[in-house]
Image: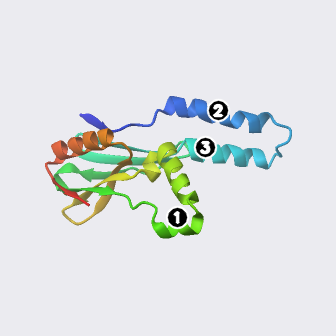
Amino acid sequence: MDRPLGPLPNWTIRWIVFGVLILPALISSQVSWIGKPFAVALMAALVGSARDSRVVGTDLKTQLFVAFVPCKPERCKLKFIVQIEAENRKGIGAVDWMFFLGFNWVMDRIMQWIWPWMAGELELWVVTARDRKMLAWRGNGDQAFQANLATLTSATGAAVKRQ
């Protein structure tokens, strides 16, 4: 049985957005030949990077995609998971606010919206019997957080620790 921890990336939309975003750089005569591959690589990294986590049979599988290229997946047997840690990521502090005049706060909000898998406020970690920690999900939104937490607890039966 395959149960994804969502929301999952929509790869069709990502490929379309990627194509639209690189088109001006490719057809522009103002961009040098050195700049064109750089622009394509930058857009691929921005649009084509995401995390895909799912419960597959007796495993928790999480895979990172960087510039549409899948990295080696991390796997963890569900029976060895002893704890699920639900965390809120540390936000922007007062010192950061004073030094950067709110720029970090604005960029943090933009990053959370564009790339929730990388900059999301909510995280779900699983801890195995050998104290190995693995990031199962990162994102925004209480509804997705609660649904993914319910999926993990029903699949593992592990205790939940909130931090």
Q: Which residue is mark 2?
A: 19
Where residue 121 appears, as percent x and y from the top left, is 39, 52
Q: Quadrant of residue 99?
A: bottom right
In this rendering, the answer to whether 21 lies above or below 122 is above
Which residue is found at the position 23% from the left and 34% from the top?
A: 1
Horizontal and vertical percent for residue 112?
Answer: 47, 48
State the separation of the CA atoms marked 2 and 1: 36 Å
The CA distance from mark 3 to mark 2 is 9 Å
Kindly identify the residue that appears in the image at 45 percent across and 37 percent down: 9
Amino acid tagged 1: Trp
On the image, the x and y values in percent for residue 24 come to 75, 35
Mark 1: few/some/many CA within 10 Å (<14, 14-19, 20+): few
Quickly name the residue at label 1: 97
- Residue at the spot of label 3: 44
Residue 144 got which mark?
none
Residue drawn 42% across and 50% down? 120
Lower sequence index among marks 1 and 3: 3
Q: Residue at x 36, y 42 (%)?
A: 141
Q: Nearer the viewer, mark 2 or mark 1?
A: 1
